Amino acid sequence: MRKLLLASVFALLPMAAGAATMPLTGSWSVSGLSDVTASPNSFTGTIDNVPLTGTQSPINLFTLSPGSSCSGPDCNKITNTVTETITVNLTNLHFDGSSLANITLTGIYTAKYSGSELSCAVGDGRSPSSGATDCLIWTGASDTYNGSTVVDETISPGNILALSFENATDWDITPTYWGQYRDAPSVPEPASIVLLGSALAGLRLMRRRKA
């Protein structure tokens, strides 16, 4: 009887969705750049249908390339540093055949041409302790090389595509993103809820009799 009740309980619990790979494509445009160039103008990648605790490898978004010297309108001659506030618009987003809402991101790009390493690059394992270093820090992310900001895109009621945009460091940096598709939890039918309650009540009764 106890085995039968346990089987009834587990049969009513939602099952984890199997892993699947689904494409995410789109285009982007960047504004706010004067001393820096960005390329290319589109991106493509895949998003894995993974459990909530799962992640996937980062996918390149675009590359930011500073000028050969600190000489443009955003150059601070005293610190030999360029600082620009950039706005990134992601448009024409399509995920597994569905159109998504446009995404607008802002961030601070800093390129230091000489001197000590930028604090946002410390610990990244790539940037030199002195010399040319740069960082892109997204709005909402911590001011560190491994910070990130997350944007949730609704695919359908209860289903969310969570996109994590990562900070970037090192010269000619390439910001990356990764995604996670979150399946909506299944809602038991009323009759199933009653059956589940009966099964749990039966288990409690058996434990009391044993005691």
Image (spheres, helix red, strand yellow):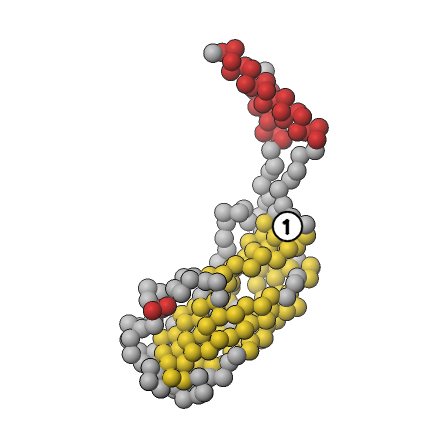
Residue 125's x, y, as percent?
A: 33, 65
Left or right: 122 as drawn, with respect to 167: left
Depth order, front residue of 129/205: 205
Residue 208's x, y, as percent?
A: 51, 13
Q: Is residue 65 in sight in this rendering? A: no
Q: Amino acid at mark 1?
A: Asn
Residue 206's x, y, as percent?
A: 54, 14
Quarter of the view holding residue 27: bottom right
Task: Report the number of discs.
Answer: 1
Image vertical order of residue 114 relative to residue 14, above or below = below
Which residue sits at x=59%, y=71%? 89
Depth order, front residue of 18/85: 85
Which residue sits at x=57%, y=63%? 45
Depth order, front residue of 82/45: 82
Please rate how many residues cluster around mark 1, counting C-alpha atoms within 10 Å: few if below 14, some from 14 to 19, many from 20: some
SS at circle 1: strand
Residue 169's x, y, as percent?
A: 40, 70
Quarter of the view holding residue 48: bottom right
Left or right: 160 as drawn, with respect to 175: right
Which residue sits at x=58%, y=68%? 104
In this figure, which residue is indicated by the disc labeled 1?
Answer: 159
Q: Quadrant of the N terminus?
A: top right
Q: Is residue 33 in sight in this rendering? A: yes
